[in-house]
Image (tube, helix red, strand yellow):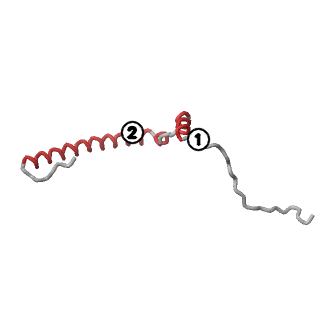
Amino acid sequence: MGNVGTTTTFPAELCTMGIPKDPWDFLARATEVGRPRSLAIHLNEEVTTMLQLIFRWLALAGKRTCSISDEVDKQMQSAGSPRKAVA
């Protein structure tokens, strides 16, 4: 009875075995249960509204930038500039 009250620890690895799913089965099951969830569910209404406004502004600014670039290209071409229009 010399070892009463003592514990011995040893390193061990816990392994779980299973059959892997086909990626399409995995995705189908994930979408059935509502995954992937959007980050938007964690944002309050004010932040969501602000982000929508920013993205709208960026879309409009991008369209405006493209139209300005087109105008500059037309002006340079009409002036006989050797600059090629960039698509």
Q: Position of residue 69 (x, y in %)?
A: 19, 47
In the picture of the structure, the residue carrying the numbered disc 2 is: 49
Q: Given the image, on which type of amino acid does mark 2 rest?
A: Thr
Left of 82 or right of it: where is 5?
right
| Nearer the observer, 44 or 65 | 65
Quarter of the image for residue 25 reads top right
Q: Given the image, on which type of amino acid does mark 1 rest?
A: Lys
The 10 Å Cα crowd at callout 2, few under 14, some 14 to 19, many 20 or more, is few
**Residue that extends furthest to the left in the rendered view of this protein:** 79
- Residue located at (42% from left, 42% from top): 47
Quarter of the image for residue 71 reads top left
- Residue located at (47% from left, 40% from top): 38
Q: Position of residue 39 (x, y in %)?
A: 47, 43
Q: Are marks 2 and 1 in contact (CB under 8 Å)?
A: no
Disc 2 to disc 1, C-alpha distance: 39 Å
| Nearer the observer, 71 or 55 | 71
Local SS, label 1: loop
Left of 32 or right of it: where is 86?
left
- Residue located at (9% from left, 52% from top): 81
The 10 Å Cα crowd at callout 1, few under 14, some 14 to 19, many 20 or more, is few
| Nearer the observer, 83 or 9 | 83
Q: Is residue 1 above or below residue 59?
A: below
In front: mark 2 or mark 1? 1
Quarter in which the N terminus is drawn = bottom right
Left of 5 or right of it: where is 61?
left
**Residue that extends furthest to the right in the rendered view of this protein:** 1
Local SS, label 2: helix
In the picture of the structure, the residue carrying the numbered disc 1 is: 21
Left of 24 or right of it: where is 1?
right
